[in-house]
Image: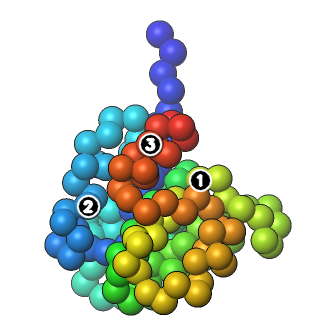
Amino acid sequence: MEYKKMKKVYLAGQPNQYDNDWKDEFIKIEEFEFYDPEIDSDQTSSKTFFPQDLVAVQNSNILVANPGIATSEATWVEVGYFLATHTKNAGDTCENLIIVWKDEREPKWPIEFIRKTGHLVTTLEEVRSKLKTLA
């Protein structure tokens, strides 16, 4: 019997409690191994979670970012680090980067810049569909 190694998916973005437990449905997908920084890293202080989370970003095959509609500076650090470690050249699009950009997210001006980084979707259902193509 041949076993396929599961791809690692890093779930960046809004904490579960602030966006309708958005991570819960993804963690149920059996084809992937998920890393949730809220659970899988020591959230005691930035001295613990910052390096742990960046190591997890680097070791992931796929990054799903859900910045929600609030300010999400840490999410953008994770996205930038993933992009830098998972593309060959500056300006390349990363096929394994999925960003949820909700219609109500403001400001709108960065959307074209963000669109160049990876797959931009507007709903969590679109994320699930995209993940299936990357399994």
Say whether residue 118 is left or right of residue 63.
right
Mark number for residue 134? none
Residue 5 higher or lower than 61, as above or below: above
- Mark 2 vs mark 3: which is more N-terminal? 2
Nearer to the camera, 60 or 127: 127
Pair 2/3: label in front: 3
Q: Which x, y percent locates residue 53? A: 43, 72
Is any part of residue 1 visible from this angle?
yes
The amino acid on which the numbered mark 2 sits, given as a three-letter code, is Trp
Q: Which x, y percent locates residue 10? A: 44, 59
Q: Are marks 2 and 1 in contact (CB under 8 Å)?
A: no
Nearer to the camera, 54 or 122: 122
Q: Which residue is denoted by mark 1 in the rendering?
A: 96
Q: Which residue is denoted by mark 3 in the rendering?
A: 129
Q: Are marks 3 and 1 in contact (CB under 8 Å)?
A: no
Residue 117 higher or lower than 28, as above or below: below
Residue at the spot x=50%, y=27% of the render? 4
Residue at the spot x=45%, y=78% of the render? 75
Mark number for residue 22? 2
**Crowding at mark 1 (Cα within 10 Å: few <14, some 14-19, many 20+):** many
Q: Are marks 2 and 3 in contact (CB under 8 Å)?
A: no
- Determine the secondary structure under disc 1: loop
